[in-house]
Amino acid sequence: MENTIIWESPSNIALIKYWGKMGEQLPCNPSLSMSLKASVSRFELSYSLKKEGDKDLVYLFEGKENNAFEEKLSRFIASLSNDLPCLGRYRLKILSSNTFPHSAGIASSASAMSALALCLCSMQEAIDEMEMPRDFFLQKASRIARLGSGSASRSVFGQYAIWGEVEGQTESSNYFAIPFKENIHPVFQELQDTILMIDSSPKKVSSTAGHGLMKNHPYADARFHQARLNMADLLLVLEEGDFDKFARIVENEALSLHGLMMSSNPSYTLLKPNTLTAIDRIKAFRDANQLPLCFTLDAGPNIHLLYPKADEKVIQNFIQEELLELLEDGKYIQDGMGNGPTRIK
Ligand code: PMV
């Protein structure tokens, strides 16, 4: 008999960046992210008892074979036998799809690995015929997601999530993410994220290689210290509601991430000329209009424009009038803060 579990899980955008890892996918500094709403991965996991000669895993992405990712998933799932002892006895079929295009500046590994981790934890529950307490379930899913992709640990939760030990956040851990829910100021409760597509060509340097370059980076210690300070400040700002301070911290994090890439050995740049032109225009527009608006960047040239829901209209006008011409085929994705994964089946 075959059973099927379906989860949809969002991507997230880091406001405090994770860049540099140690041990078994543990972060060198804590990070904080906002989970997105529209940019999600859907994972459909079907399982049935393995018979002799059965392949362990069949994987299709948007209906098509993807051997490279199938092998990656196979290795990942095989490495989870201690956490999820049920896995060895079943053959798995996984169908996945994303609501967002590839290379759009949206971390598909975060949404994919979190959706997969949730499916696998639900499968364990179904086989054991026993539901785990909700908090325990999410913590386990976050830990497993982390092993697949560090930033995926945060996508298991909606709104804001922290991954990595933070002073004063007693529940925080390097092993899994936790939700950050403490009295978030209304201005940050329904943050909008317009993802401006500057360039969708595939990255020259993977995140894994980028993390690796932090190992001998001359600024590594200073960076990990900076991230801790920015984290402490941002946690206060999220409660106080000061958008100017928020913008200063979030933009400092984004540009520091790219500064680290530009100053590593070997160095590389992911920003494009239009990224810089757009950043200049965003700052000029903000200064001229005194509006709550800021940008962040993932490991790529595309810009995440963040602003409160209340200012949506005027900022949409600004995008149309001043930014559209800088975008690849005029493309952008309208997204915003979401409430986390949903179990569909
Ligand atoms: O989760 P990874 O290994 O793909 O690394 C993600 C790193 C950044 O996206 C650049 C920052 C972050 O914290 O999400």
Image (cartoon, grey):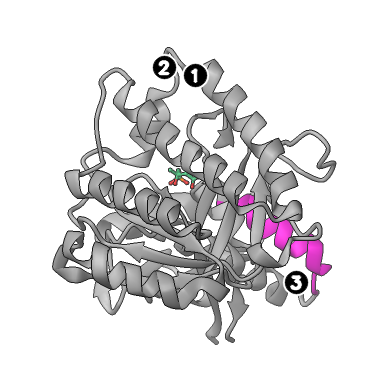
* Residue type, mark 2 in image: His
Q: Amino acid at mark 1?
A: Ala
Q: Amino acid at mark 3?
A: Asp
* Horizontal side of residue 134 vs 243, given as left or right: right
Which numbered disc, 3 or 2, marks the residue closer to the eye? 2
The residue nearer to you, when weighing 151 against 313, is: 313
Residue depicted at 66% across the width and 72% down the height: 122
Q: CA distance from mark 3 to mark 1?
A: 44 Å
Q: Is residue 212 left or right of residue 227?
A: left
- Whether residue 325 is visible, yes or no, is yes
Q: Measure the alpha-carbon separation of dots 1 and 2.
A: 5 Å
Disc number placed over residue 128 in the picture, else none: 3
Asked whether residue 241 is drawn in magenta, I would say: no
Q: Residue at x 54, y 83 (%)?
A: 4
Q: Residue 181: x and y, percent?
A: 77, 60
Label 1 element class: helix
Q: Is residue 322 left or right of residue 328?
A: right
Is there a contact, CB below 8 Å, between mark 3 and mark 1? Answer: no
Q: Give neighbour class at mark 1: few <14, some 14-19, many 20+ (Cα, 10 Å).
A: some
- Magenta residues, as a range? 131-145
Q: Give the mark nearest the N terminus, 3 or 2.
A: 3
* Residue at the disc numbered 1: 220
